[in-house]
Each structure stands twice: as structure tokens, then as C-alpha cells.
Amino acid sequence: AWRAPCKCKHGHDAHDPRTRRCHGCACASFVSDYVCIGCDGAQEEHETVLEVESERRAAKKPVGDAFAPLQECSAELRHAVLGGAAPSHQSLEDRVARGEF
């Protein structure tokens, strides 16, 4: 399983969730050692916001597949970064002929 890395090189699971102190070294607080794939910002620069689809639509924000990360990138890059179903390299005509659509 992926573990968010701290600057001390220990994973997030080696840090106390309340105090953020590291159990593996003298690190005083978890500080992310990675950046967001969407904005290149640190984890500490983000805020978790919960919105339902109707709220997003009312605010004219993307929903569904349009809201998924890396939509502006190729299917191959999305698969390499996020995993999931591998992109198909077959032509659209071949896929239609097989009844996939």
C-alpha cells in the first residue's frame, strides 16, 4: 500500500495522527515530501472540501468524469499515474464492430 512520505523519509503511518510526531525518528511533525498531481502544491497547502454533485453543478464546477484527476492528459498517462483499467489501443471502429459501444 502507498504511504504518504514525510521529509524524514518515514511514511504517514509512522506518525501519530494527533501530534504528527514520528515514531521512527526525532521528526517533530509530518511534512509531506510529495506534491499534488493536479497543482504541484504540498499536501499541507490543501483543504478537504466535501461537495455533493448538485452543489458542484450550481457552482458551475466539473462533475463525474470531468472532475477526475488528469482529464487533460492522455489515457496512457492517467493509467500510469492512477492505475485502473488500461487504455485500449484498438481503433474506435474495431471496438464498435465488436459491440463495445
Image (cartoon, rainbow, N blue to C red):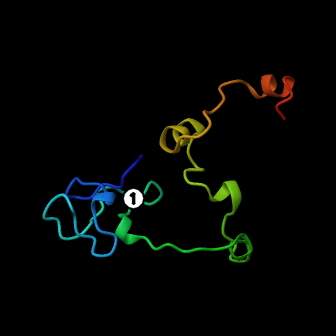
Q: Residue at x 79, y 22 (%)?
A: 94
Relative to 7, is 51 above or below? below
Q: Position of residue 84 (x, y in %)?
A: 58, 40
Quickly name the residue at label 1. 40
**Quarter-wise, where is residue 50 in the image?**
bottom right
Q: Residue at x 86, y 23 (%)?
A: 97
Relative to 89, is 58 above or below? below
Q: Residue at x 54, y 42 (%)?
A: 78
User: How many circles with numbers are drawn on the protein?
Assistant: 1
Q: Of helix, strand and loop, which one carries label 1?
A: loop
From the viewer's perspective, is 96 left or right of 52? right
Q: Position of residue 4 (x, y in %)?
A: 35, 55
Q: Position of residue 101 (x, y in %)?
A: 84, 35
Q: Position of residue 93 (x, y in %)?
A: 81, 25
**Quarter-wise, where is residue 96 in the image?**
top right
From the viewer's perspective, is 54 left or right of 71? right
Q: Amino acid at mark 1?
A: Asp
Q: Residues within 10 Å of mark 1 (few under 14, many from 20)?
A: few
Residue at the left extreme, as displayed: 26
Q: Residue at x 35, y 64 (%)?
A: 42
